[in-house]
Image (cartoon, rainbow, N blue to C red):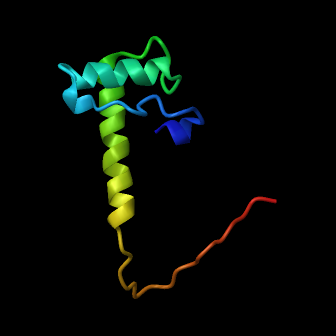
Amino acid sequence: MSQVAGVADPLAGVDLAELPDPEAALAERLRAGGVFGAGTDDGAIVTLVKRFAANAQALATHRAGTYTVPAVLVHARDG
């Protein structure tokens, strides 16, 4: 998520599994790293991170099937 937010990885070198409360530690490090604002509560952060991870996994494993209807492919680029 830090790449999307444009900040350094606030989890670099941290093994959340070794901590007594991984979700709270995750939320605190993401807030401290500037990924989320100071007022964002732990539950909201954990929910968003889980959704982001699920979406990233779905995107990584998705393989488009064969379509029998006309489709338009739009290719855009910067500049």
- 60 relative to 35, above or below: below
Relative horizontal placement of residue 6, taking residue 65 as reference (left or right)? right
- 47 relative to 52, above or below: above
Question: Where is residue 18 shown, x and y percent of the image?
Answer: 20, 28
Residue farthest along the front direction in this orientation:
13
Q: Residue 11 sits in which quadrant?
A: top left
- 50 relative to 65, above or below: above
Residue farthest along the bottom direction in this orientation:
68
Residue 52 in view (yes/no): yes
Question: Where is residue 40 shown, x and y percent of the image?
Answer: 42, 17
Question: Where is residue 58 shown, x and y percent of the image?
Answer: 33, 58
Which residue is located at x 50 percent, y 23 percent? 33
Query: Looking at the image, which is closer to me, 4 or 51?
Result: 4
Query: Disc count in the image?
Result: 0
Which residue is located at x 47 percent, y 12 percent? 38
Question: Where is residue 72 shown, x and y percent of the image?
Answer: 58, 78
Which residue is located at x 24 percent, y 25 percent? 22
- 5 relative to 38, above or below: below
Q: Residue 63 sits in which quadrant?
A: bottom left
Query: Looking at the image, which is closer to me, 56 or 22?
Result: 22
Which residue is located at x 35 percent, y 22 percent? 27
Relative horizontal placement of residue 21, taking residue 32 as reference (left or right)? left
Query: Looking at the image, which is closer to me, 70 or 59?
Result: 59
